[in-house]
Amino acid sequence: MKRLVDIVVAAIALLLLSPLLALLAWRVRRKMGAPVLFRQVRPGLYGKPFEMLKFRSMRDVFDVDGRPLPDSERLSDFGRWLRATSLDELPELWNVLRGEMSLVGPRPLLMEYLPLYTPEQARRHEVRPGITGWAQVNGRNAVSWDDKFKLDVWYVDNRRLWLDVKILWLTVRKVLVRDGISAPGDVTMPVFKGNHE
């Protein structure tokens, strides 16, 4: 049932939002150049890698040694607005349609985090990653890594269709008030370094 709902909702959303997607793509291209989409390999169901799609929100700016500058210096005003409104996430509807993601589930993090998880934290990969999730509506990037993982595992153990509907509704509210967009002192979320922190 969850997969069927994902397919139907993602397909309808992509159809209805196609003018907005086209406008955002044009704005990203105009403000930051090509490519319009940010593509990154993330772990999906059971940790299987997939290519996640988002609208690009950071400029390609490097230091004298060719290393990317910190996120705070690469994030443009337009990119900051994209993230604050969560519009940068809309291309992930393609990932949902392809079966790599769900509308609701733990957010897909970085591949390099996989060996850092405890067995309990790794349980977040027992379901498809989501565009939004229980951790996102309970603090988003403003909660600690430990709390975020506990919320993810709670979702894995308690997932139901009614809970997904509740999370989607709460996500709309969170986006409208722009709550929990970044961690204190960061423009996004600090790097996860394992459980020795």
Image (cartoon, helix red, strand yellow):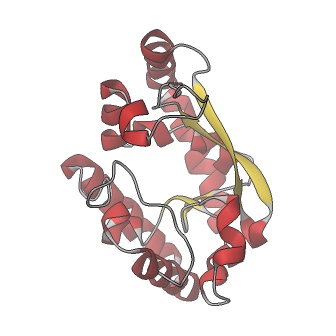
Residue at the image point whose x is 71% and y is 62% from the top = 44
Q: Is residue 152 above or below residue 83?
A: below
Of 33 and 151, the residue lying toward us = 33
Q: Is residue 50 above or below residue 106?
A: above
- Quadrant where the image shows the N terminus: bottom right
Q: Residue reaching furthest right?
A: 48
- Residue 187, position in %: x, y? 34, 48
- Residue 22, position in %: x, y? 51, 18
Residue at the image point whose x is 31% and y is 53% from the top = 181
Please give left or right for residue 140 compared with residue 150 in the image.
left
Q: Using the rendered image of the protein, determine whether residue 128 is visible from the camera's viewpoint.
A: no
Which image quadrant for residue 109? bottom right
Please give left or right for residue 127 compared with residue 82 in the image.
right
Of 79 and 95, the residue lying toward us = 79
Of 187 and 88, the residue lying toward us = 187
Q: Is residue 6 above or below residue 91?
A: below
- Residue 159, position in %: x, y? 54, 80
- Residue 77, position in %: x, y? 30, 27
Residue at the image point whose x is 56% and y is 30% from the top = 15
Which image quadrant for residue 20? top left
Residue at the image point whose x is 50% and y is 25% from the top = 61
Q: Using the rendered image of the protein, determine whether residue 60 is visible from the camera's viewpoint.
A: yes
Q: Residue reaching furthest front?
A: 64
How many numbered circles are shown? Answer: 0
